[in-house]
Image: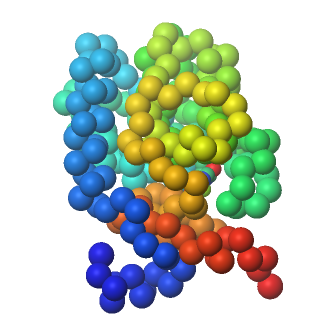
């Protein structure tokens, strides 16, 4: 993205992963998922709202029919810090008991959100539960968590774009970008 365009997104420091890199990596991810999970029904579950754009692109690269469902979570506390206390604000429409599931999440950071979600889904006894995350920030992990497919491993910086937000903004930015530190570190007036 050129400098002129970035100026429209004033709190962005720089592009971390370009739309071209995302598109190329999606081919690899979809290939791996297709080779391991083909040959049976698959329900792809996206975590709202951050995973929407990733899921939309990913499922269109899978060479077999899938069904799609969503759940929404909110974690209590500041928007750039995960408190680990997770509340389900929209549950699944499907009964997942006995089904083959691919959970799609935008980012695994401390691991607390995913850890909670996996416990919640496993309690409903799916036949198979695989996890695909677009981004992994391993430096910040507080709990070990199952991740089967990772798009990109990234450093400990707050990123937005391609579905990820800061205070509801930047989800429609096509690249994954680093937010200026002063934006999320300075207390807001
Ligand atoms: P945990 O810490 O529970 O965090 O693994 C997962 C959730 O935290 C949010 N998160 C981010 N959101 N840019 C974002 O837009 C980031 O760099 C970031 N790090 C964590 C995200 O909602 C994720 O589901
Ligand atoms: Mg978020």
In the image shown, does 93 or 68 lie closer to the viewer?
A: 68
In the rendered image, the residue lying farthest to the left is: 63
Residue 160 % position (x, y): 50, 63
* Res. 80 in view: yes
* Res. 106 in view: no
Q: Residue at x 42, y 87 (%)?
A: 7
Residue 36 % position (x, y): 30, 18
Q: Taking 79 as reference, is 111 above or below it?
A: above
If the image is split into quadrants, where does the N terminus sit? bottom left
Q: Taking 96 as reference, is 108 above or below it?
A: below
Q: Residue at x 64, y 68 (%)?
A: 167
The image's colouring method is: rainbow
Q: Residue at x 54, y 70 (%)?
A: 179
In the image shown, does 46 or 26 lie closer to the viewer?
A: 26
Q: Taking 94 as reference, is 7 above or below it?
A: below
Q: Residue at x 76, y 61 (%)?
A: 78
In the image shown, does 110 or 54 lie closer to the viewer?
A: 110
Q: Taking 29 as reference, is 57 above or below it?
A: below
Q: How many marks?
A: 0
Residue 46 % position (x, y): 48, 40
If the image is split into quadrants, where does the C terminus sit? bottom right
Q: Is residue 84 left or right of residue 127?
A: right
Image quadrant assignment for residue 67: top left
Residue 44 % position (x, y): 42, 32
Image quadrant assignment for residue 173: bottom left
């Amino acid at each position: 993205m050129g400098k002129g365009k970035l100026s429209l997104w004033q709190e962005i420091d720089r592009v971390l992963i370009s739309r071209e890199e995302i598109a190329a990596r999606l081919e690899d991810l979809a290939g791996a998922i297709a080779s391991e999970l083909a040959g049976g029904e698959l329900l792809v579950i996206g975590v709202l709202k951050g995973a929407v754009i990733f899921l939309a692109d990913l499922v269109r690269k899978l060479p077999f029919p899938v069904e799609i469902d969503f759940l929404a979570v909110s974690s209590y506390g500041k928007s750039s810090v995960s408190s680990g206390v997770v509340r389900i604000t929209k549950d699944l429409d499907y009964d997942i008991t006995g089904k083959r599931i691919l959970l799609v999440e935008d980012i695994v950071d401390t691991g607390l959100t995913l850890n909670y979600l996996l416990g919640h889904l496993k309690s409903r006894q799916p036949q198979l539960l695989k996890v695909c995350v677009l981004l992994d920030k391993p430096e910040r992990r507080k709990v070990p968590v199952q991740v089967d497919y990772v798009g990109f491993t990234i450093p400990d910086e707050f990123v937005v774009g391609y579905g990820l937000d800061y205070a509801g903004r930047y989800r429609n930015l096509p690249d994954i970008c680093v937010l200026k530190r002063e934006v999320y570190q300075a207390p807001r007036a």
